Image (cartoon, rainbow, N blue to C red):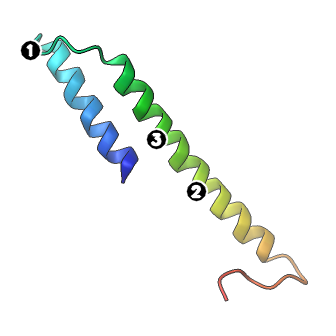
Amino acid sequence: MLAFNNAYRFRDLVYKQIFKSNEEDIRPQLLVTIGSWILLIGIIIIAIASQQKAEEPGLKSILG
């Protein structure tokens, strides 16, 4: 949810920059947006890797 919210805020800032209605610098919001997407992707990768590890023979599934 955080990644989508930050992406929306970044898009809004870009539109304001294009139409010159905003003097804010977009770099800080860009870094927050990129960081939140990296965090989201990392969480997904960890969840997939954890599930694959749990499904190996001899290990109990973490999902029950």
Looking at the image, the residue that sits furthest to the right is: 58
Looking at marks 3 and 1 on the same chain, the residue that comes earlier in the sequence is marked by 1
Q: Which residue is mark 3?
A: 36
Relative height, residue 39 to residue 61 (above, below): above
- The quadrant of the rendering that contains the C terminus is bottom right
Looking at marks 2 and 1 on the same chain, the residue that comes earlier in the sequence is marked by 1
SS state under label 1: loop
Q: Which residue is mark 1?
A: 21
Cα distance, mark 3 to mark 2? 12 Å
* Circle 2 crowding by C-alpha within 10 Å: few under 14, some 14–19, many from 20: few
Looking at marks 3 and 2 on the same chain, the residue that comes earlier in the sequence is marked by 3
What amino acid type is highlighted by mark number 1? Ser
- The quadrant of the rendering that contains the N terminus is bottom left
Q: Which residue is mark 2?
A: 44
Q: Is residue 54 left or right of residue 9?
A: right
Relative height, residue 18 to residue 56 (above, below): above
Q: Position of residue 27 (x, y in %)?
A: 37, 17
What amino acid type is highlighted by mark number 3? Ser
* Circle 1 crowding by C-alpha within 10 Å: few under 14, some 14–19, many from 20: few
Q: Position of residue 63 (x, y in %)?
A: 65, 83
SS state under label 2: helix
Cα distance, mark 3 to mark 1? 26 Å
What amino acid type is highlighted by mark number 2? Ile
Relative height, residue 19 to residue 54 (above, below): above
Q: Which-is-in-front pick, marks 2 and 1?
A: 1
